[in-house]
Amino acid sequence: MERALKLVAYSLPLIFAFAFLVPLIDQGMQALGMAAPFGLLTLTFALMIGGAWGLIAQTTGRWL
């Protein structure tokens, strides 16, 4: 049980990125009428940006 909790705690930046940032980026782009670059869907673009940002936050320990 302790090992599972440590794994969840370690993964919190990625969980936050995929549960909050990705939908926020996607809906924000759709509300503003912005198109994703390279012909991607806004959700695909949001997954790439949010996932990368969450991965950076997880490895460095900082969001900025």
Image (spheres, helix red, strand yellow):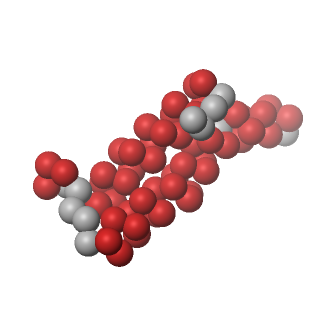
Whether residue 25 is visible to the viewer of this picture, yes or no, is yes
- Which corner quadrant holds the C terminus? top right
Residue farthest to the bottom?
A: 31
Choose between 15 and 53: the one closer to the eye.
53
Asked if 39 appears above or below 9 in the picture, the reply is below
Asked if 1 appears above or below 59 in the picture, the reply is below
Asked if 61 appears above or below 33 in the picture, the reply is above
Choose between 4 and 13: the one closer to the eye.
13
- Residue sitting at 78 percent across and 34 percent down? 6
Whether residue 4 is visible to the viewer of this picture, yes or no, is no
- Which corner quadrant holds the N terminus? top right
- Residue sitting at 61 percent across and 50 percent down? 16
Horizontally, is 21 left or right of 7 in the view? Answer: left
Give the x, y percent position of residue 21.
Answer: 51, 55
Q: Tell me where residue 32 sits by quadrant.
A: bottom left
Choose between 11 and 3: the one closer to the eye.
11
Residue farthest to the left?
A: 39
Q: Tell me where residue 33 sits by quadrant.
A: bottom left
Q: Tell me where residue 10 sits by quadrant.
A: top right
- Numbered circles on residues, count: 0
Give the x, y percent position of residue 11.
Answer: 65, 38
- Residue sitting at 60 percent across and 24 percent down? 60
Residue farthest to the top?
A: 60
- Residue sitting at 56 percent across and 59 percent down? 20
Horizontally, is 26 left or right of 19 in the view? Answer: left
